[in-house]
């Protein structure tokens, strides 16, 4: 009898992303923020903490691509794209002060905005792309013939939407900025070409995810290539939502940043 194949639901993917994100932020907030930039750190401690931070940041590379994957999956299946976008927008504002406190150790830093800004901009871009796709189908549903005029129109508007979203992300200095927006659009465009053949869908998901990681690596550095480890989880993804924590993550993101900022402020000077 054949053994059961590993099954990963959307809920499991979200847990993996939350855990790896937290590990990444421990490095970014506690180690980098309070020790690398602090005075009185011995050379021996600096080297040790630097190595530890590198490990934490490598593990953390797994988080953002999974969140992009889940964002696109959520976009495809949500009953209200407007409410989805409003939730993202609300929590990008709620999370900004906790993000600045954790990463920059001050309540406001206009030069960099939290990753929710990137997610909401990317969401709006793919929402626009989806609206255009419905308005200008590239294939005649009756004859099956390609409609070159519609295809050209869609490609043009898609590029304009992507350029606009990338510009906004760069202007706001969002986390992952334009690269993050382009990665979200890439994942969406592949999902839009899905068909009913499950094997083909899985192959397309894996290809899209790999391309998304390469885009992030080109825009944010080769360390992002560690996210290719996520392909194991994407391969095992069964397309089911699993246990949902609809509002847990939204609340967890600012809450864990506040906690880490407090730990960085209170604990780390003691181990210099």
Image (cartoon, grey):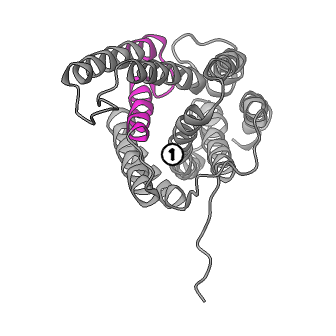
Q: Is residue 238 left or right of residue 249?
A: left
Q: Residue at image x 59%, y 13%?
A: 109
Determine whether 191 is above or below 179 in the image: below
Q: Residue at x 80, y 32 (%)?
A: 266
Do we see residue 199 in this rendering? yes
Q: Quadrant of residue 46?
A: top right
**Residue farthest toward the left in the current orientation of the protein:** 148
Q: Position of residue 234 (x, y in %)?
A: 51, 55
Residue found at x 46% / y 50%:
227
Task: Report the front residue among 268 and 83.
Answer: 83
Q: Quadrant of the C terminus?
A: top right
x, y percent for residue 211: 34, 44
8 and 29: which one is in front?
8
Residue topped by disc 1: 61
Prevailing secondary structure class for the magenta stretch in the rendered image: helix
Give the number of callouts. Answer: 1
Q: Tell me: 182 left or right of 97.
A: left
Span highlighted in magenta in the image? 167-192
133 left or right of 113 in image = left
Q: Is residue 261 visible?
A: no
Please state if 147 lies on the left or on the right of 211 as rendered: left
Name which residue lies at 55% across and 44% down: 66
Q: Residues within 10 Å of mark 1 (few under 14, many from 20)?
A: many
Q: Position of residue 96 (x, y in %)?
A: 66, 18
Q: Is residue 178 magenta?
A: yes
Which of 21/182 is in front? Answer: 182
Quadrant of res 169: top left
């Amino acid at each position: 009898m054949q053994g059961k194949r590993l099954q990963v639901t959307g809920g499991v993917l979200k847990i993996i992303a939350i855990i790896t994100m937290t590990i990444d932020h421990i490095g970014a907030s506690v180690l980098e923020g309070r020790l690398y930039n602090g005075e009185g750190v011995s050379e021996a401690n600096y080297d040790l903490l630097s190595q530890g931070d590198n490990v934490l940041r490598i593990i953390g590379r797994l988080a953002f691509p999974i969140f992009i994957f889940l964002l696109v999956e959520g976009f495809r299946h949500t009953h209200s794209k407007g409410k989805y976008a409003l939730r993202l927008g609300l929590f990008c504002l709620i999370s900004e002060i906790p993000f600045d406190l954790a990463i920059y150790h001050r309540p406001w830093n206009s030069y960099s905005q939290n990753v929710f800004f990137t997610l909401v901009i990317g969401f709006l871009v793919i929402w626009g792309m989806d609206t255009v796709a419905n308005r200008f189908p590239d294939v005649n549903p009756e004859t099956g013939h390609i409609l070159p005029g519609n295809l050209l129109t869609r490609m043009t508007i898609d590029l304009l939407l992507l350029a606009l979203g990338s510009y906004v992300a760069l202007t706001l200095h969002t986390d992952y900025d334009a690269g993050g927006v382009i990665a979200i659009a890439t994942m969406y465009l592949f999902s839009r070409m899905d068909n009913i053949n499950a094997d083909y869908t899985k192959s397309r998901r894996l290809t899209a995810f790999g391309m998304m990681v390469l885009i992030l690596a080109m825009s944010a550095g080769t360390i992002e290539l560690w996210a290719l480890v996520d392909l194991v989880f994407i391969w095992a993804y069964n397309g089911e939502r699993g246990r949902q924590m609809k509002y847990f993550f939204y609340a967890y993101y600012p809450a864990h940043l506040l906690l880490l900022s407090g730990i960085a402020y209170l604990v780390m000077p003691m181990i210099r």
